[in-house]
């Protein structure tokens, strides 16, 4: 009867910065719902039912239907005052109150002409509604030119309620070409509150998933350090397997910055090259950033990975937060090349890795060593008879750093372990042998050092269960655990510290056989760790509701191996207590305490409480680490009503009595558009928060069309747990 498959795309994508056709939108605030097409279930597949007050024919060639005419298929409906059908030419002409409907759209017109043989149709003064997008519009003329092309003359399009045009789009001509997957528009104007704010004399846009070049959503904002901000990304579809996004960005106090993101994809490799350049008027010099990421399958099941990054100065990521969010608060910029291959029970890797220290004032001793190269191999063969396991680790590293001890380190760890257990206990004894060989330059002691050390460990525990709660609705466990470790002493003061530090003070690290990370120190010890844990589960859902654990190490002798040359004479470690609690699906509580019994004081204490329910979110946090930090934060998302939402975050350093990050935002949503405004104050951690940057950003969303401004949702999602954007 009628085939206008791409009418929906024609009007929905008539914009240079359209959202995906399948994007979810919230239309609950609209007064008039989208129409819903109901299939005619009593009409058979492929059949057409014709109804009219009167039917006339001339020689059987022309059929004239008059009065409340209805042509009905299961998935299409055509109604009008008069319909004329010419059988030989398969032409249909409908006049007077013509309405056409299918599952995608409803279209009304004063006159419709359809030529099914040539696949043409013409609608005079059509008005249309798009199901699912709450969109509607009108045109002076709509013509289906052929099987692939549709053209609108003097089109108006909006997703607002009838009688409301808070935003709307006008184009003098719009054409859709299904064959090329493109649409084109001439003299397009975009209006908001009847104020035109975008004019394009001509542009093209995609109508399917085939990529094409075009302008993306612009971003605007203001920051105290950079002034006004405007960027307009331009996408260039160079070829099916590589493309580029060029983003000119203007900063009121700095000048024009050019950023490019170049992506490529081949059968066995892919990558991305990011480049940025700016003649910074405020900085007084050129500033640039380069990042190349590449991965490839190079044959024989070997995967290669490349990361190269470079910058003009160490402050570039602070001054341009959106340039590379992954490097926020980065002190050392990593670059590496690696080749890796894995099997079912093993993995090998060859790595070259170096670092660029962003702060030139960083002391040499605080800079990481380059590893040029690092060769590693790890294997875990299948267990032998009776559950005996023999894991193996090998590593060879060449360390390099200016004005420092350098050299090579070979490190081999072999183990013999036996695992036994079932649902109520486990018992795992293990004997580990570590062999390490150093060939050094510029060492204050020997340049050739060899170390071999055995470590014996026994890890065992029990699991008790009981029903809990007034109605036995919970399952509670009690899980005592003992972990014994013995490693003899060997003097390691002559060994430099290439990549070693003390383990973080967490409950899980109490059950490691070495108190140091890396291979430059193997801690001497004779100790036993006592751990107590309890969990609570919901019997009906199986969800974990609580996990409480506490542990402490008891030492039988002093530890003489250290990083600073001083022995540790404490008879027991700090007591570490951790709690994770989920009282219901809306609340999460996490806490951690590290208690120093020798000083009778708490060294570390962390507490976070998160609540989220139906758009409302509230978070409290307190973080303390002795001589390092003390910070408190509170954040909130508060839906005032269905249209207004307030977002806020207060994050303060109690140690420095300065701002870490403060945010205050407000969002307003109507039927067909929404606005977000976010003001922020951010402290610079590198300067102990003595410097702050104030900023304000805007984001305007035209539902069913586009959004423009700063990506506020991404920033709030990182800053406020539980934040879920409404639009």
Image (tube, rainbow, N blue to C red):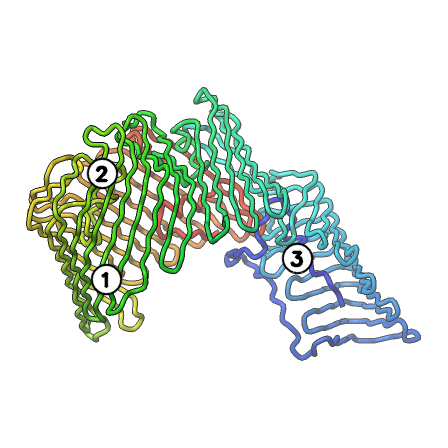
Report the Cα–Cα distance between label 1 and label 2: 28 Å
- In the rendered structure, which disc, 1 or 2, sits on the residue that comes first in sequence? 1
Q: Position of residue 448 (x, y in %)?
A: 23, 35
Label 2 secondary element? strand
Residue located beneath label 2 in the image? 629
For label 3, the residue is 8
Do we see residue 680 in this rendering?
no
Point out the tag, 3 or 2, that comes first from the N-terminus: 3
Element type at mark 1: strand
| Quadrant of the drawing holding the N terminus | bottom right
Q: Earlier in the sequence, mark 3 or mark 1?
A: 3
Count residues near mark 1 (Cα–Cα under 10 Å), then give few for <14, some for 14-19, many for 20+: many
Please identify the quarter of the rendering in which residue 335 is found.
top left
> Distance from label 3 to label 1 (Cα)?
51 Å
Q: Height in image: 358 above or below 409?
A: above
Pick the residue in front: 189 or 365: 365
Q: Which residue is mark 1?
A: 546
Residue 440 at least partly seen: yes
Q: Nearer the viewer, residue 122 or 94?
A: 122
Q: Nearer the viewer, residue 392 or 582?
A: 392
Viewer-nearest of labels 3 and 1? Answer: 1
On the picture, is 8 further left or further right than 536? right
Disc assigned to residue 140: none
For mark 2, does the 10 Å Cα neighbourhood hold few (<14), some (14 to 19), or many (20 or more) residues?
few
Where residue 670 sits in the image (x, y, percent)? 51, 51
């Amino acid at each position: 009867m009628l085939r206008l498959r791409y009418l929906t795309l024609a009007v929905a994508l008539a914009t240079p910065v359209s959202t995906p056709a399948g994007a979810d939108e919230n239309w609950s605030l609209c007064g008039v719902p989208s129409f819903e097409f109901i299939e005619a279930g009593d009409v058979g597949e492929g059949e057409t039912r014709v109804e009219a007050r009167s039917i006339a024919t001339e020689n059987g060639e022309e059929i004239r239907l008059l009065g409340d005419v209805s042509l009905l298929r299961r998935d299409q409906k055509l109604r009008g005052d008069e319909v004329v059908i010419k059988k030989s030419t398969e032409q249909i002409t409908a006049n007077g109150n013509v309405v056409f409907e299918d599952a995608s759209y409803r279209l009304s017109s004063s006159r419709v002409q359809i030529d099914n043989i040539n696949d043409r149709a013409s609608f005079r003064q059509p008005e249309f509604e798009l199901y699912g997008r709450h969109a509607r519009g009108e045109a002076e003329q709509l013509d289906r030119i052929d099987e692939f092309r549709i053209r609108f003359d003097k089109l108006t399009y909006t997703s607002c309620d009838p009688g409301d045009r808070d935003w709307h789009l006008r184009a003098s001509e719009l054409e859709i070409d299904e064959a090329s997957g493109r649409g084109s528009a001439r003299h397009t104007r975009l209006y908001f509150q009847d104020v035109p704010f975008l004019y394009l004399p001509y542009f093209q846009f995609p109508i399917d998933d085939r990529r094409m070049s075009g302008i993306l959503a612009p971003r605007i904002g203001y920051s105290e350090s950079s002034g006004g901000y405007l960027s307009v990304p331009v996408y260039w579809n160079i070829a099916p397997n590589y493309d580029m996004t060029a983003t000119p960005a203007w900063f009121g106090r700095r000048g024009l910055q050019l950023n490019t993101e170049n992506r490529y994809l081949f059968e066995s490799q892919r990558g991305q090259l990011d480049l940025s350049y700016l003649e910074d008027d405020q900085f007084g010099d050129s500033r640039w950033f380069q990042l190349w990421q590449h991965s490839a399958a190079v044959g024989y099941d070997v995967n290669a990975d490349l990361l190269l990054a470079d910058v003009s100065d160490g402050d570039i990521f602070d001054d341009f937060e959106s340039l590379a969010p992954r490097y926020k608060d980065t002190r050392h910029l990593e670059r590496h090349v690696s080749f890796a291959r894995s099997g079912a029970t093993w993995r090998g890797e060859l790595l070259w890795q170096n670092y660029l220290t962003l702060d030139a004032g960083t002391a040499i001793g605080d800079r990481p060593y380059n590893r040029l190269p690092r060769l590693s191999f790890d294997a875990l063969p299948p267990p032998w008879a009776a559950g005996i396991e023999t894991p193996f680790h090998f590593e060879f590293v060449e360390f390099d750093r200016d004005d420092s001890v350098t050299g090579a380190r070979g490190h081999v760890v072999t183990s013999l372990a036996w695992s036994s257990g079932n649902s109520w206990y486990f018992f795992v004894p293990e004997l580990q042998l570590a062999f390490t060989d150093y060939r050094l330059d510029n060492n204050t002691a020997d340049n050739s050092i060899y170390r071999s050390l055995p470590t014996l460990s026994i890890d065992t525990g029990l699991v008790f269960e009981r029903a809990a709660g007034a109605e036995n609705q919970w399952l509670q466990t009690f899980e005592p655990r003992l972990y014994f470790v013995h490693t003899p002493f060997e003097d390691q003061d002559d060994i430099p510290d290439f990549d070693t530090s003390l383990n973080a003070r967490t409950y899980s690290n109490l059950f490691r056989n070495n108190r140091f990370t890396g291979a430059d120190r193997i801690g001497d010890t004779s100790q036993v760790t006592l751990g107590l844990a309890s969990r609570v589960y919901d019997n009906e859902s199986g969800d974990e509701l609580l996990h409480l654990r506490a542990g402490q190490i008891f030492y039988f002798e002093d530890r003489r191996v250290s990083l600073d040359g001083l022995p540790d004479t404490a008879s027991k470690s700090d007591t570490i207590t951790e709690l994770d609690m989920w009282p219901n699906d809306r609340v999460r509580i996490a806490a951690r305490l590290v208690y120093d019994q020798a000083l009778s004081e708490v060294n570390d204490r962390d507490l976070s409480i998160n609540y989220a329910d139906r758009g409302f979110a509230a978070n409290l946090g307190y973080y303390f680490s002795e001589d390092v930090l003390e910070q408190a934060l509170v954040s909130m998302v508060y839906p005032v009503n269905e249209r207004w939402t307030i977002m806020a975050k207060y994050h303060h350093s109690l140690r420095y009595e300065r701002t870490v990050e403060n945010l205050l935002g407000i969002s307003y949503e109507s039927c067909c558009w929404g606005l977000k405004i976010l003001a922020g104050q951010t402290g610079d951690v590198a300067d102990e928060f003595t410097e702050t940057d104030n900023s304000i950003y805007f984001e305007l969303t035209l539902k069913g069309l586009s959004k423009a401004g700063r990506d506020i949702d991404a920033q709030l999602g990182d800053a406020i747990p539980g934040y879920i954007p409404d639009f």
